[in-house]
Image (cartoon, rainbow, N blue to C red):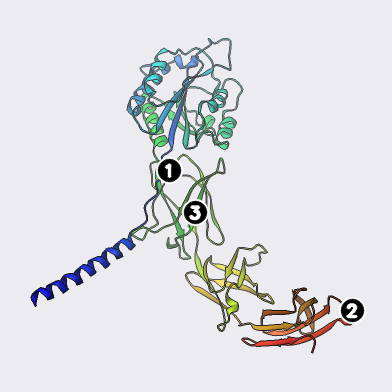
């Protein structure tokens, strides 16, 4: 007896464990899809113009800059998904005369080539002029085609453009065409912020310590993504709105960089996003209507919080009664006072909208217009239309006919009958109607017939054009 009881308990326990396993399996989250890590390519544009031979701190600006850049390369030589290249200007021709084409890619991109850059730095000499704009322009050719790369330029210089070029215009063109991200410029010896702020992100190095620090900060910003969150604010200014998809565009190129679906994390806070801090974004939050953050700049290395007003409520469309006419019936939703279609919502559905006034156009027969529908914060606004009736139209002959709405003796066309059918069934809203009809075979307007009728909710009305 005890054995039977034990076996029964064992069986029950097995069933419970099986059901638990099925339940747990069903509750598993879908796998996270990781996107391929982009290859970061950093091109150093190094100033070897004659002015770099000037004394500065413990040595010449040229020797100090070469030494600090070489030390930095030692620390990043083995980084994954990172490649470096070196372009130098002012090193091929002695000044004077001024040779404004004096720029050359000395070490192209390639894996593990930090040592090659260090070796080349030891052998170059400073002697020429400063063709900054031309060097930036030529740098566009230094980045081989790549479908998943971040292209970054780091310019190290002690002077400004000397060849009548426009570094700002060239940099803007390179960014707009998606060739490079916003460049970094490290100015040696004096403050060039006014001259280079339009070119990219400027760092001032007034001494050796500042140069080393600036270079380390630049490389850190170039290599590391940073974190941010988007707070979608309700009407009270609290970040409670969520579940809207968001598109991040690069303002310079207009290209899509990221797509996210806004999410609250397990602590009930807007989830953290990991983004490239070197891009200035425009963010479209795909609510109805769309909410846009025009300019979003990320602070590298810091958690950036951006907020946008996105208070939302709900609209529910329903039809009185139990008629099948609600199936497939749709409604055009427009912002109050606008002629542009915002959404087409089906009856029986509930959809979310930014708070405010909306105009509805129900695609029934006849169409129903409802103005100034108020959507309020976290509230569901229900709109109900009357249940239609059914008009069974018997024509006897095929022909041409128009269904007119009779509203206070004003006849308005709402539907053209099928010229090839003798029987049609139409769902019509309650009201007074008239059909004007002529058989197809008749060649005289004297054969025009008229038939008036009334439609009531939920009832079928039989219309016989020829009795």
Is 289 above or below relative to 202?
below
Residue 48 appears anywhere in the view? yes
In whole angstroms, how far apart are the C-alphas of marks 2 and 1?
A: 78 Å
Percent from the top left, x then y, of residue 36?
A: 42, 41
Of the two numbered discs 3 and 2 in the rendering, the one whose residue sits closer to the viewer: 2
Q: Secondary structure at mark 3?
A: strand
* Horizontal side of residue 407 vs 197, given as left or right: right
Give the crowd class for mark 3: few <14, some 14-19, many >=20 residues within 10 Å. many
Q: Please tell me whether mark 2 or mark 1 is closer to you in this view.
A: 2
Q: Alpha carbon of mark 3 to alpha carbon of mark 2: how far? A: 60 Å
**446 in relation to 42, above or below:** below
Q: Quadrant of residue 269?
A: bottom left
Q: Which residue is mark 1?
A: 299
Residue situated in front as seen by the camera: 191 or 329: 329
Cβ atoms at labels 3 and 1 below 8 Å apart: no
Q: CA distance from mark 3 to mark 1?
A: 20 Å
Write the residue at 14% across / 72% down. 7
Q: Which mark is residue 21?
A: none
Image coordinates for residue 465, horizontal then vertical, percent: 78, 85
The x and y percentages for residue 452 are 77, 86
Q: Residues within 10 Å of mark 1 (few under 14, many from 20)?
A: some
Tell whether 249 sits left or right of 124: right
Judging by the rendered image, the residue that carries numbered circle 2 is 445
Residue 455 seen anywhere in this rendered image of the structure:
no
Q: Secondary structure at mark 1?
A: loop
The disc placed on residue 246 is: 3
Q: Look at 57% across and 74% down and name the residue there.
A: 327
Q: Quadrant of the C terminus?
A: bottom right
Direction from residue 436 to residue 165 in the image, left or right: left
Residue under the point 37% across and 56% down: 30
């Amino acid at each position: 007896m005890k054995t039977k009881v034990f076996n029964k308990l064992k069986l029950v326990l097995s069933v419970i464990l099986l059901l638990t396993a099925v339940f747990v399996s069903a509750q598993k989250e879908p796998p996270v899809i990781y996107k391929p890590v982009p290859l970061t390519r950093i091109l150093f544009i190094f100033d070897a113009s004659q002015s770099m031979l000037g004394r500065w701190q413990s040595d010449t600006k040229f020797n100090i800059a070469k030494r600090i850049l070489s030390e930095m390369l030692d620390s990043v030589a083995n980084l994954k998904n990172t490649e470096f290249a070196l372009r130098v200007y002012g090193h091929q021709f002695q000044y004077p005369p001024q040779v404004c084409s004096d720029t050359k890619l000395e070490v192209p991109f390639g894996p593990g080539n930090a040592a090659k850059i260090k070796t080349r730095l030891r052998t170059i000499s400073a002697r020429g002029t400063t063709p900054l704009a031309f060097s930036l322009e030529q740098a566009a050719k230094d980045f081989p085609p790549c479908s998943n790369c971040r292209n970054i330029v780091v310019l190290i210089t002690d002077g400004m453009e000397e060849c009548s070029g426009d570094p700002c215009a060239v940099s803007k063109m390179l960014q707009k065409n998606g060739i490079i991200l916003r460049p970094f410029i490290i100015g040696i010896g004096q403050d060039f912020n006014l001259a280079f702020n339009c070119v990219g992100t400027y760092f001032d190095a007034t001494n050796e310590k500042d140069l080393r620090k600036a270079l380390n900060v630049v490389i850190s910003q170039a290599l590391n993504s940073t974190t941010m969150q988007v707070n979608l604010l309700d009407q009270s200014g609290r970040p409670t709105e969520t579940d809207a998809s968001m598109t991040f565009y690069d303002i310079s190129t207009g290209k899509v960089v990221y797509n996210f679906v806004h999410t609250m994390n397990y602590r009930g806070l807007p989830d953290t996003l990991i983004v490239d801090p070197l891009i200035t974004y425009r963010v479209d939050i795909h609510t109805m209507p769309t909410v846009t953050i025009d300019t979003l700049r990320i602070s590298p290395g810091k958690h950036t919080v951006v907020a946008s007003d996105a208070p939302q409520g709900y609209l529910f469309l329903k039809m009185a009664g139990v008629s099948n006419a609600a199936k497939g019936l749709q409604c055009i939703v427009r912002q109050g006072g606008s002629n542009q279609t915002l959404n087409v919502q089906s009856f029986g559905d509930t959809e979310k909208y930014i708070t405010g006034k909306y105009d509805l156009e129900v695609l029934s027969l006849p169409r129903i217009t409802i103005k100034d529908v108020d959507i309020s914060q976290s509230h569901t606004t229900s709109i109900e239309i009357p249940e239609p009736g059914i008009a069974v139209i018997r024509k006897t002959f095929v022909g041409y006919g128009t269904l007119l709405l009779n509203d206070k003796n004003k006849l308005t066309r709402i539907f053209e009958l099928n010229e090839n059918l003798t029987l049609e069934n139409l769902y019509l809203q309650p009201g007074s109607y008239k059909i004007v009809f002529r058989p197809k075979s008749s060649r005289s307007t004297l054969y025009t017939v008229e038939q008036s009728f009334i439609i009531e909710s939920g009832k079928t009305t039989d219309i016989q054009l020829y009795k």
